[in-house]
Image: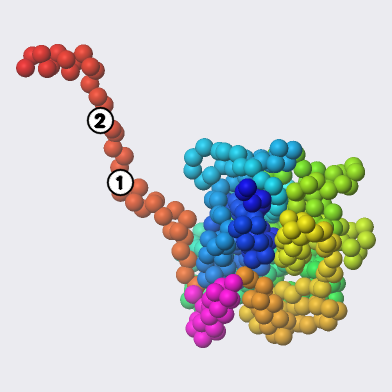
Amino acid sequence: MNPPRIVVVGAGHVGLYAALRLSKKLNRNRAEVVVIDPVPHMTYQPFLPEAAAGNISPRHAVVPLRRELKKCRIVSGEVTKVEHARKTVTVQPIDGPAYEMEYDHIIVAPGSVSRTLPIPGLSDMGIGLKTIGEAIYLRNHILDRLDVAAATPDEEVRKASLNFVFVGGGFAGIEALAEMQDVVADALKYYPELDPKEVHFILVEASNRILPEVGPEMGAYTARQLAGRGVDLRLSTFLQSCVDGQIVLSDGDTFRAETLVWTAGVKPSPMLANTDLPLGPKGHVNCLPTLQVADNETSEPLEGAWAAGDCAQVPDLTNPGAWCSPSAQHAVRQAKVLADNIAQVILGGAPKEYRHKHVGGVAGLGINKGVAHVYGIKVKGYPAWLMHRFYHVSRIPSFNRKVRVVADWVLAFLLKRETVALGQLHHPREEFTEVTPPVALPTEKPATEKTVSAGSR
C-alpha cells in the first residue's frame, strides 16, 4: 500500500516551511511530500529591498528547493486547477503537456500577487516588488536612469529620469524607497554632471499614515525621517494616471517620471478561482483556526484540505472577529502548526488551533537607520536597524543562507557599495541578434521536378 501523498501548492514561506517540517516528522514510508512551484526556489521577500539595493546578493535572498527539501519530490510547474471533490490537481509543467496528480492531503499556499488598480498606464510602466527578478530589475533601472540623466541634453528627459515615484506606504514600499534613496546618494558621487538637488523621491500613499504595522508613533517618526531626507510625502493621495510617464495625482499635481514602483498591497493568487475550494469575500481560502479548509455555510472542515499564508483567511484567535494579517510572521508560524496538524491526522491524532499574537514589526530605512515596535517597545535609529537585520537573518531558512547573507553584509561594510547597472541582464540576446541576420530555410523542390531531373541523367 502506497503512503498518503501530500501535495504542496506553492513554495513560498508556507509551502517551504511546511514541506520541510513534514519531511522531518514523516519519513517516506509514512507520507510522500510533493512540492509544486513554477520556480525552483523560495524567495525570502523581506530581503528584496536589500537585494535591490545591492546590500546582499540576489542569489542569497532565495532558498533553492532541491537543496533544502531533499526528502521531498519537487515538481517544476504550475497548478492550474484543484478539484478537491476528486482529490486531484492539474499540473502544467514548465515544458510539455498538463497532467493530473492525485493526493490524500493538499496544502494550498500559492501566496499572493500585487494588488493593482485600473489606472491608465500602470501596466506599461509600473514595477512591482514581489520577486527577485523585479528586485534586480528595479536596481538596474534606477541606476540606468542616472546614466540617462547624465548624458542627455534634454532638460525634460533629465528631470523625468531623476523623478522616482513609489506607490504604497507599507513595509515593502517604505523599505524599498529608503534603500534605493541610499543607492542613488552613493552613486551620485560618481556623477559630477548631476546635482543631488535634482533627484526627487516621491511617496504616494492613499491613507493618511505610513507603516501602520509599527504603530502611529513610529509611523510618524518614519515620516519625519523621510521628509528630513528630502522625500516628498504625498499622504491621502491617489495615483490617477501614468500614461507615457505623465504622473497625475489626486492632489492636482502633474509631472513626468520614468520610474514608478507599485507596492500598494497584495491580493490572493488568481489560481484560487480555478478550484472548488470555498473562498471568502476577497478571494481567500476559508479556513478554521486549525488551518483546515472549511465549508462557507456549515464551517465543517473539508477532509484533506489545508491552507495558510497570504491566500488564506484564518481567524485571529487573539483578536476575535479579525483575520490574521498577510505577513511573513504569521505565514512562518502557520506553516509549523499546519505541518504538525497534518502529521497528527496521518498518525491518528487531532489537529490543534493556530494562535499567535502579532508581536509588532521592524523596518529598515536604509543603512544604519530603522524603526521597530516589538512587544510594546519602541526603538528607532541604529538599534532598530540592527534588530531588523538580526530578526530577518534568523528567519531565512538554512544555515547556508544565513552565513551568505551575513558575509554580504560584512563585505558591504568593509567595501564600497557597487553602483553599476547591469541592464543587459534583461535582454541578454539583443546584441547577438543584431549581428546575426535571419536566414531563410531552403525550400524543397516539388517531387515531380526531382523525378524529371533524375530521369534526364
Q: Is 374 included in the stretch rendered in magenta? A: no
Q: Are marks 2 and 1 in contact (CB under 8 Å)?
A: no
Residue under numbered circle 1: 436
The magenta stretch spans which residues?
398-418
Percent x, y of residue 394: 66, 76
Please provide percent x and percent y for residue 197.
Answer: 61, 73
Question: What's the image's color scheme?
Answer: rainbow
Task: Say which element carries label 1.
Answer: loop
Kind of residue sitting beneath label 1: Thr
**Which circle, 2 or 1, is nearer the viewer?**
2
Q: Which is the main secondary structure of the residues drawn in magenta?
A: helix
User: Which residue occupies the foreground of this view, 452 or 399?
Assistant: 399
Q: Quadrant of residue 370?
A: bottom right
Amino acid found under the numbered disc labelled 2: Pro
In the rendered structure, the answer to whether residue 311 lies left or right of residue 184 reads right
Which SS class for mark 2? loop
Which residue appears at 84% of the width and 54% of the height? Answer: 288
Residue identifier under label 2:
442
Image quadrant holding the C terminus, namely top left
User: In the image as oriented, which residue stretches furthest toward the front?
Assistant: 1
Instruction: Name which of mark 2 and mark 1 comes first in the sequence.
Output: 1
